[in-house]
Amino acid sequence: MKLSIITPTYNRANMLGNLYNSIVKNLLQSEKVRQDVQAQWLIMDDGSTDNTSEIIEQFINENKFEIQYHKQQNQGKMTAINNVIQYVDGDLIVECDSDDVFSDNAFYDILQAYYETKERKDLYGLCFLKYDLKRNNIGNRFQKDETTMFDLYFKERRNGRKSNCLFYKYSKTISI
């Protein structure tokens, strides 16, 4: 399974190392992950004026996994996400902000959920809770095991940040 992590960034050179290290840690965490998960990190720099490009170049030179760096003139986060989607070729797409980090077992949990649901024709993605660095949930827990994004936020009134993993087969028809 190939996981395409997309990250829009703007002047966050000082934070990208935490995200990078969490990706590396997840790739090494268990034999199952090492065998079954490839990672691709696609970064769209939204016109940063700090040393973001130099930091990303250091990560690329370490050659621990595939990293692609792209830069655009400042157009905002949503445009950066929509512009980086064209480079995705993984089975799942995970949008991860430049100030986020993956929890220690994130890739294992994603892998398990992917294998349990990948054949279902009625799903276009997976949704996971996000936590802060003190392991506090950022927002409400889910009320149901399965729902739609509309129902999640408008009918069930769940709030807070969620981590969405979209199945690649639908990525060319969805704009975020």
Image (cartoon, helix red, strand yellow):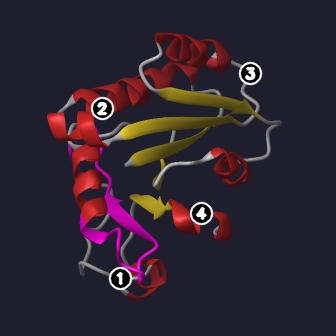
Q: Amino acid at mark 4?
A: Ser
Q: Secondary structure at mark 4?
A: helix
Q: Quadrant of residue 137?
A: bottom left
Question: Is there a contact, CB below 8 Å, between mark 1 and mark 3?
Answer: no
Q: Is residue 99 magenta?
A: no
Q: Is residue 127 magenta?
A: yes
Judged from this view, the residue extending furthest toward the right is 73
Q: Amino acid at mark 2?
A: Leu
Q: Earlier in the sequence, mark 1 or mark 2?
A: 2
Total marks shown come to 4
Residue lying farthest to the bottom in this orientation: 155
Residue kind at label 3, given as amino acid type: Thr
The location of residue 148, given as percent across then percent down, is 42, 82
Looking at the rendered image, the disc whose residue lies closer to the viewer, 1 or 4, is: 4
Residue 149, position as x, y percentages in the image = 46, 77
Q: CA distance from mark 3 to mark 2?
A: 30 Å
Q: Residue at x 48, y 82 (%)?
A: 150
N-terminal-most mark, 1 or 3: 3
Dot 1 or dot 4, earlier in sequence: 1
Q: Residue at x 54, y 66 (%)?
A: 169
Say what secondary structure mark 1 lies in: loop
Residue 171 badge: 4
Name the amino acid, label 1.
Thr
CA separation in Å, label 3 and label 4: 30 Å
Q: Which residue is mark 1?
A: 147
The x, y position of residue 104, in whole percent, is: 22, 37
**Disc 2, SS:** helix
Residue at the spot 64% in from the left edge and 27% down from the top edge: 11
Q: Which residues are magenta?
A: 116-137
